[in-house]
Image (cartoon, rainbow, N blue to C red):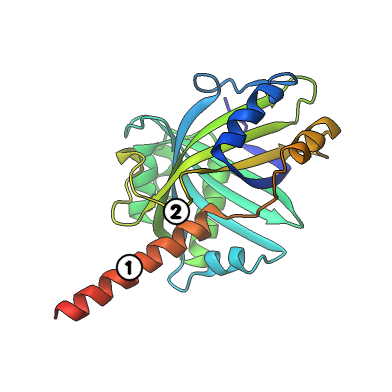
Amino acid sequence: MALEVFSRYEVKYLIPYHVYLQIVPYLLEKMRYDKFGKNGSYNIVSLYFDSDDKKIYYETRNKLRFRQKLRLRVYDDATLDGASFLEIKQKYNNVVNKRRTMITLRDAYHYLDTGNTSHMDQYNLTNPQTLKEVDAFKSLYDLKPRVIVSYDRQAFHGLYEDDLRVTFDYNLMCREDDLRVENGPEGKHFVDPGLVIMEVKVTHSVPLWLSRLLSEFECPKDSVSKFCTSSDLTEKTSLLQRTKEEVTI
C-alpha cells in the first residue's frame, strides 16, 4: 500500500519528451521501475478544489511560504467501488507534506455531496483522522470542486537511495465541464504535448550522480504548478466562451 503520510523535497524540471526518453536508460543504472503499473507507468486523474475567490490558486501562484491544496485522486481505470484518495498537500519552506486516506470513490462522492463527516463510520477508508483534517480544511476555505487534471506518469525508485523517487508526467490535460474522475483522462492539453514535467522527490538531498546527469542533459528547473496552469487554461476557455455567447446575443 502506498504511503499515506510523508514529508520530502520535490524539485521540478520541464524537459522535452525526447530528453525524457534519453534519460531513462541512465536512470535504470541506479534506479528501478516503480512497483505500480507496467514498467512504472500508470495514469492519474485528480479533482482539485478551490474557493470562489480562488484562495488556493493565489496561494500557489504567489508562492506563499505556506500553501496547501486538496484533491481527490484515482489511478488508471477507476470505478465507484474502487479505490480513490482524498489528499491534502502542503508546502512550507520548500518541504512538501502529504496526508491522504484511501476511500472508495462512491464514499468520497457521498462525503462531498453531504458536506460533512456524519456518515464517516459507514465509509470504507483507511485513515479516519485524515478525513477529519480534509473536512476541516475544506470547511475553513469553503472549498468546492474546480478542475480535473490528468496525465500519464512513469515513476522510478532508487536502488541505493531508498528515499529517492523520480517521476515523468506527460500528456497533461484538464477539464472543468465534467468533474467526475471515473470518466478518465479527457480534456485539453495545458502543457505542450512535446514537454514532460520531471520531478525529483527526496527526503534529504539530490544524489550527486543524479545532479550531474540532469546537468549533462541541461534540464532546467521549473516550478510549474499543474493546478495553476490548468486553472489558467480553463479560465481563459471560459472567458472566450462567454465572449462568443455575448457576440452571438
Mark 1: which amino acid?
Ser
Left or right of 52, for residue 14: right
Mark 2, secondary structure of its residue = loop
Left or right of 96, for residue 42: left
Q: Label 1: which residue?
A: 238
In the picture shown, does residue 33 fall above or below 82?
Answer: above
Q: Label 2: which residue?
A: 190
Residue 212 lies in what quarter of the image? Answer: top right
Residue 105 lies in what quarter of the image? Answer: top left
Label 2 – label 1 distance at C-alpha: 14 Å
Mark 2: which amino acid?
Phe
Mark 1, secondary structure of its residue = helix
Question: Which mark identifies residue 60?
Answer: none
In the picture shown, does residue 103 fall above or below 32?
Answer: below
Rendering coords of residue 162 (x, y %)? 76, 25
Residue at image location 64% in from the left, 61% down from the top: 67
Q: Nearer the viewer, residue 249 or 117?
A: 249
* Image quadrant in which the C terminus is located: bottom left
Q: Can see residue 20?
A: yes
Residue 104 lies in what quarter of the image? Answer: top left
* Image quadrant in which the N terminus is located: top right
In the picture shown, does residue 9 fall above or below 92?
Answer: above
